[in-house]
Image: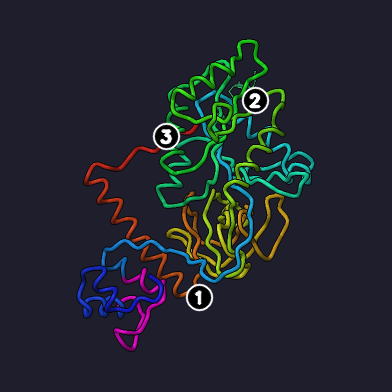
Amino acid sequence: FEGMTLVELAKRTGKLVPTLQNILVNVGEKVDSEFDSLSIDVVELIAMEAGVNVRRQHSNEGAEIHPRPPVVTVMGHVDHGKTSLLDALRQTSVAAREAGGITQHLGAFVVAMPSGASITFLDTPGHAAFSAMRARGAAVTDIVVLVVAADDGVMPQTLEAISHAKAANVPIVVAINKCDKPAADPERVKFQLASEGLLLEDMGGDVQVVYVSALKKTGLDDLEEALLLQAEMMELKARVDGTAQAYVVEARLDRGRGPLTTAIVKAGTLVCGQIVVVGSQWGKIRAIRDISGKSMDKAKPAMPVEIEGLKGLPMAGDDIVVVESEERARMLSEGRKKKFEKDRLQRISEGREEAPEEQS
Ligand code: GDP
Ligand code: MG
C-alpha cells in the first residue's frame, strides 16, 4: 500500500475520491493532488476510516539480508512436559548464566550454542498463544517443538498442535519427553505420529525426532542441535538495516516503569527513541533491554527485547510499527482503537466472539 495515490486507494476501497479526501481532512492530513503518493501511515488511516482492512507489507527489496536465529514455540498435550522442558532449556540460556540462574519470565529467552549460533524460545507454551499470535497475523514462530510424553503417547492436543503447525506452515521437531520413565515407549509414539501423517526422519521423511527427559535434563543438546539443523535447512534470513518490523510476545505493567513489552524484531533494527504504534497503543521507546536486563540502544532480528515507553499495554501478536511523529502515532492509535472496537462489536453481534482459551 506504500506509495498508493488517492485515486488508486479509491479503486481499492470502492469509495469515491472526494469521500476519501474528506476523511483525509478529518484525520488532519493533506495531499496536494489525488495523484500524489501517500505514505503507508496515511493509507492506513484513510482505510480505517473507510472501514477497509489493510495489512502492512514490508518490502525487503534491495536490502542486504543476513542469517538470523530461529524463533521456536513449544506445543503438545497437557502434562506432557512443555513447561518442564522450557524450564530446563531456560537454565541453559544466556540470561540464566549471566543472572546466576535466576531469570524472570519475560516471554522469551535465548540459548547460545558453543558454535556461536543461538536459538530464541518463546516462553509461553500452548496452542492459545500460538493461535492468538497467528490470528493477528504475527508469523513469529519459525519452528514448533512438539512435546509428546513417551509413556502417554499421542493425545488430542498433540493432534491439535500438529494441525496448528501445519496450518501455519511451520515445521515440527518432535521431542519425545519423559524418556526416563520405566513405562516410556518412544517407538510406539513414533509409530502413532507416523500414522497421523508426520513424515519422521528415520522413516524416510524430514521431521526430526529427539529423545529427552525434561526432568533428568537429558537430550537437551540433541534438541538444540536438531533445531539448529532445521533452522539451517530453512535458511532463515532477515534484513538487518532499515525500519524495524517487530511483534509483541508479551506485555506487563511495571509499577515504576509503566507498560513493559517483550518484543521480537522480525526484520530491520528497532532503535531507542523511535516512535512506535503497537496494536492500538503507541509510545516513544525510552529504553530497550535485552533478556538479561542489559540496556541497549538497538534491537536486531530474532533478538527478544524488553521495550519501555508505551502508553498502554499491547497484546501478544500485535505488530510494532515505527512512525515519523508523535502526532501520527496518536492518530493511528486512536484510529485503530476505534476500528478494533467496531470489529469487536460486530463479532459479538454475529455471535463470533470467542471465550478466551485456557492455557496449560
Ligand atoms: P505441561 O502441562 O505440558 O506444561 O507439563 P508440565 O511441564 O507441567 O509437566 C507435567 C508433569 O510431568 C509434571 O509433574 C512434571 O514434573 C512431569 N514431567 C515433565 N517432564 C518430565 C520428564 O521428563 N520425566 C518425568 N518423569 N516427568 C516429567
Ligand atoms: Mg505447562
Chief SS of the magenta region: loop
Mark 3 residue's CB less than 8 Å from ligand 1? no
Residue 105 lies within the magenta run: no
Range covered by the magenta-colored residues: 26-46
Q: Position of residue 95 (x, y in %)?
A: 73, 46
Label total for image: 3
Q: Secondary structure at mark 2?
A: strand
Residue at (36, 68) in percent of width and height:
44
Which is more N-terminal, label 1 or label 2? Answer: 2
Report the side of 188 relative to 100 (left or right): left
Q: Secondary structure at mark 3?
A: helix
Label 2 and label 1: CA atoms lie apart by 49 Å
What residue is pinned by disc 3?
Answer: 163
Please report contact status of discs 1 and 3: CB closer than 8 Å, yes or no: no
- Res. 289 mark: none
Residue at (35, 63) in percent of width and height:
54
Q: Position of residue 174 (x, y in %)?
A: 57, 31
What residue is pinned by disc 2?
Answer: 211
Which is more toward the observer, 145 or 295?
A: 145
Given this view, does label 1 or label 3 mark the residue nearer the observer? 3
Label 1 and label 3: CA atoms lie apart by 40 Å
Note whether residue 270 is visible: no
What residue is pinned by disc 1?
Answer: 324
Q: Position of residue 130 (x, y in %)?
A: 47, 41
